[in-house]
Amino acid sequence: MPDSTYDVAVIGAGPAGLAAAKRAAECGASVALADDNPQPGGQIWRGEDRWDGPSGVSLLCGARVFAAPEPGRLSLETFDGDLGLGYRSLIIATGARERFLPFPGWTLPNVMGAGGLQALAKARLPVKGKKVVIAGSGPLLLAVAKYMCGHGANLRLVAEQASDAALYRFGLGLAGHPGKLLQAIQLRAALVGTRYLTACWPIAADGLDKLESVTLYRAGNTWREPCDYLACGFGLVPNVELPALLGCRLGASGVEVDDYQQTSVAGVYGAGEVTGIGGLDLSQVEGEIAGYAAAGKADWARPLFAARRSHRRFAASLERAFALREELKNLPQDDTLVCRCEDVTFERIRRRSGWRDAKLQTRCGMGPCQGRVCGGALEFLLGWKADSVRPPIFPARIESLIGTGQEACPTGPKYPRP
């Protein structure tokens, strides 16, 4: 497929990416909006037609970035072949993924992410009448629980690892965010009659060939809860592979950006969860700021700074309330698989000195997911962070790699190492 060049390229068509593309196009810029899903909306609006932006935006759905051969150009793989995407400004809105924590039995069929179960249900996985347990941490659990109830699932309970005290303090803070308070009330109202257990978490998934029950822990007591599906999500991890490949500076929460959402690399912007977990409203306003700035209208972005500050305060309170407790580091046993792609147990991993050593000695993180599952777990369990990203950042066809040529894997000074 031939290369195309745009004023602004937006990678990720979730709330941040949609907002960015819309604002950039309104400024008169030529815009390409790419996402690896078959339609825009991201994880939050999966299956919903949420694009109401200018018709001039080129939508590239089903297109996945796998390499950045040179500044101003990305290599994408589509259903029809590979595509070179040129840009003058780039907005990275690649969002986040769920953090999974390994525990005995977590690889059994029908144990999945909370957002993953919701995505499968939206893709018509039958959940009506199925016994469902939702566990982990964060507001996503309630959103998924509401969806399950609305589609006829037999929701057994929601297990939230945060304490009553932490949630109480968080609830008091919602008084300063009326919109969020209303959302919280609506979510809880939709789940009246459903058990919502705080300071509770799964310690084992039980079953022979597939999930049959989950063993839960709370206040020194354990019990088995029968279920057909166990949906677990222990917060979110930003998808920083692409900005890391481009040499963007990363911080503790995600990609570091300035007031106009520009990263440490000139002309490259970050918006949404890739810069830190903050929720829908923060993602959208960051996307708008990035869209204006990337299109050369930075002055138009300044009126949005106050709203962003407010949303960031809420994000900080969210992070404090749902911080993972230390006890969860005891979930994996020695024989528990942590890297499920390469069948590497926790006992083998924890004897290594760090992420690179574990990859070299055990192949941990070298399977098809390239550490996207075990990486988030080991960051929490052992404090490890991946120290490099190399293309292809997603699995790619040999045909695409050959078409990209030697520049698909830059080794020179084109991009500084993060």
Image (cartoon, rainbow, N blue to C red):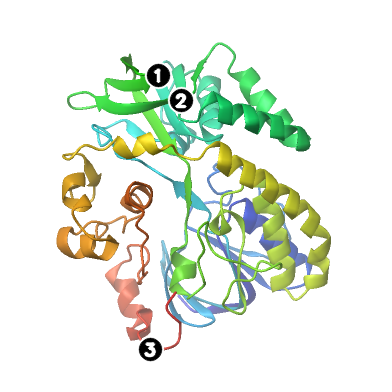
Percent x, y of residue 228:
33, 21
Pointer 3 or 2: first along the chain? 2
Pointers 3 and 2 in contact (C-beta within 8 Å): no
Q: Is residue 200 left or right of residue 212?
A: right
Image location (x, y in percent) of residue 152: 49, 18
Count residues near mark 3 (Cα–Cα under 10 Å), then give few for <14, some for 14-19, many for 20+: few
- How would you rate the neighbour count of disc 2 (Cα within 10 Å): few for under 14, some for 14-19, many for 20 or more? some
What's the distance in space between the residues labelled 2 and 1, CA to CA?
Answer: 7 Å
For the point 35% across and 40% down, which residue is it? 101
Judging by the rendered image, the residue that carries numbered circle 1 is: 219
Q: Quadrant of residue 91?
A: bottom right
Q: Secondary structure at mark 1?
A: loop
The label nearer to you, 3 versus 2, is 2
Q: Residue at x 75, y 35 (%)?
A: 179
Distance from Cα at disc 1 to Cα at disc 3: 55 Å
Looking at this view, is 190 or 75 the one in front?
A: 190
Q: Are marks 2 and 1 in contact (CB under 8 Å)?
A: yes
Mark 1 vs 3: CB contact within 8 A? no
Assign the C terminus to one quadrant of the image: bottom left
Distance CA(mark 3)–CA(mark 2): 50 Å
SS class of the residue under badge 3?
loop
Q: Which residue is mark 2?
A: 199
- The residue that appears at 30% across and 39% down in the rendered structure is 102
Which of the two discs, 2 and 1, labels the residue nearer the N terminus? 2
Query: Percent position (x, y) of residue 216?
Result: 34, 21
- With respect to residue 156, does 73 lie above or below? below
To which residue does mark 3 refer?
A: 412
Local secondary structure at mark 2: loop
Which mark is on residue 417? none
